[in-house]
């Protein structure tokens, strides 16, 4: 009895989505860690609650926000793609 080929190997699209998911996951963790603490959440427990006199958002922070949101959207698309691939495989 022969087993279908699709059960042994990942399709090219699935492999691409898996790699994309891994890369964006690691990138999201790094980007979130780069953000400056802005509130009195858990970061204030570890000394991050001290506010500087320059509390305004800089261009770097705004760009970091944009990159983080863009990476999060790519991550979401990869998750949805993998889910659809599993459902219709």
Image: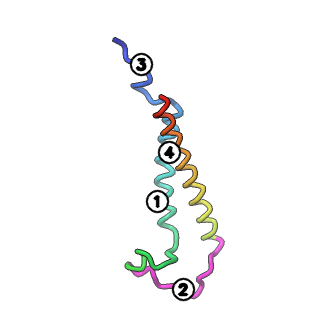
* Marks 2,4: beta carbons within 8 A: no
Q: Which mark is residue 29?
A: 1
* Marks 3,1: beta carbons within 8 A: no
Tell me the CA gap for discs 2 and 3. Answer: 62 Å
Front one among 86 and 52: 86
- Which residue of the protein is positioned furthest toward the right in this rendering? 59
29 is within the stretch colored magenta: no
Check disc 3 and report the residue beneath it.
4
Check disc 2 and report the residue beneath it.
52
Tell me the CA gap for discs 3 and 4. Answer: 25 Å
Question: Which comes sooner in the sequence, label 3 or label 4?
Answer: 3
On the picture, is 26 further left or further right than 59?
A: left
Question: Which comes sooner in the sequence, label 2 or label 4?
Answer: 2
Q: Secondary structure at mark 1?
A: helix
- Which residue of the protein is positioned furthest toward the front in this rendering? 87
Q: Which mark is residue 55?
A: none
Question: What span is in magenta?
Answer: 46-59
Tell me the CA gap for discs 4 and 1. Answer: 16 Å
Check disc 4 and report the residue beneath it.
79
Residue at position x 56%, y 60% in the image: 68
Of the two numbered discs 3 and 1 in the rendering, the one whose residue sits closer to the viewer = 3
- Quadrant for the N terminus, please: top left
């Amino acid at each position: 009895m022969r087993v279908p080929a699709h059960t042994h190997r990942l399709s090219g699209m699935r492999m691409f989505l898996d790699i994309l998911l891994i890369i964006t996951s690691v990138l999201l963790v790094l980007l979130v860690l780069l953000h400056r603490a802005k509130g009195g959440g858990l970061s204030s427990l570890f000394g991050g609650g001290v506010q500087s006199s320059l509390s305004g958002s800089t261009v770097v922070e705004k760009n970091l926000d944009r990159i983080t949101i863009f990476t999060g959207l790519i991550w979401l698309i990869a998750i949805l793609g993998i889910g659809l691939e599993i459902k219709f495989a």
